[in-house]
Image (cartoon, rainbow, N blue to C red):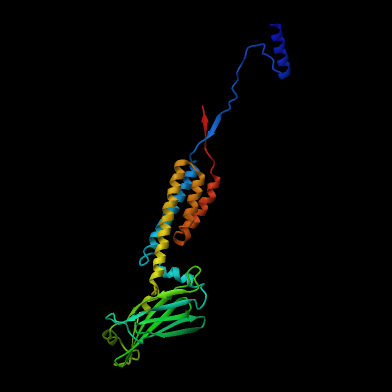
Amino acid sequence: MGDVDASDDYIDELTGLVEPSGELMFVSSDSKLTIEVDELTNVGNSIAVLILVTCLLGLINGIDYTQPESGLVRPDEFVFRFAQNAPDESAIFNGHVFDDQGEPIVNATVYISWYEKEYWNTSSSQTDQNGFFEIEKLDPGITRVDIIVDRDNYKDRFSNRVLLSPPALFEPYGFTSIDFTMPSQEKFSEQECADGSEDCKIREIDNSPNQMEHPLMDSGASMIYSTIGIGFIGLSLLGAGFTLWAMKSGSVYLLRTASALSFFTMGHYYSACLFSLVAFVLTFTINKPRRVIN
């Protein structure tokens, strides 16, 4: 027993631990043990609501794009913005000319003109046996198209305002294809002569004044416009799904992903882009909430 006591004293000397001689007393330090909780703070939930509103703006914008005939932003405005920066002579215009019975008109003159800086440029083509025409090396943008047909000693001129499409992505040329139906001779005979006379050899029906806001354009461009709208709708729904997932799981990373997705929905007048950028920056101010363990 003596050897054991001596060993214990030796260990106490090495460790510096000495058995207390008096009674033990425990004192509270008022310290609290906390752990991180997988949920968003009030700030995080507020940012999530902002992202949901942004997704709603993108959804409305996408629905607007899928309704090219009645939307707030029309496809011709969309195409016209791209045409402003397109290279010169990068548009090709083709189509067919038919009469009021649906038969192709042979040797009709398709005359196209567009204003550039301080003068008018012009180009023309004749329709073939199938009523087909094609004109190359045109400038994308707004043009005036006159179709002139000689019949029964009269020159009937049918005029329209046409928007030529710019090249798409990496394509060298933009293609615009439009088919025209010439009004009947009876409708031309009902028109007043430009010089005020009773009988005129040149008769004209001009639709361009009614096409100032929304000119004729390639139907394929409208389809692309609608497809972009479907993409906006998909991104909006995906962004909203990520936001709800973040609110449920408390993940800040999911919230940032949702804000990035909502950015590409654009929104009217780029409203979604603005709100999503604000939301993305604010996500860096979110701190993980902590809960006290009793």
Residue at point 52%, 31% (across, down): 292
Judging depth in this view, the residue of 194 and 124 nearest the camera is 124
Q: Residue 169 location, x and y as percent?
A: 49, 67
Residue at point 73%, 14% (across, down): 10
Task: Choose top left, top right, bottom left or bottom right for residue 184.
Answer: bottom left
Q: Residue 262 location, x and y as percent?
A: 47, 54
- Classify the position of the N terminus by image quarter: top right
* 251 lies above or below 193: above
Task: Choose top left, top right, bottom left or bottom right for residue 5.
Answer: top right
Q: Residue 165 location, x and y as percent?
A: 45, 73
Judging depth in this view, the residue of 31 and 165 nearest the camera is 165
Judging depth in this view, the residue of 130 and 65 nearest the camera is 130
Furthest-top residue in this view: 1
The answer to whether one can see residue 230 in this image is yes
* 206 lies above or below 74: below
Q: Residue 249 location, x and y as percent?
A: 46, 41
Residue at point 52%, 38% (across, down): 289
User: Total label count?
Assistant: 0
* 36 lies above or below 228: above
The answer to whether one can see residue 57 in this image is no
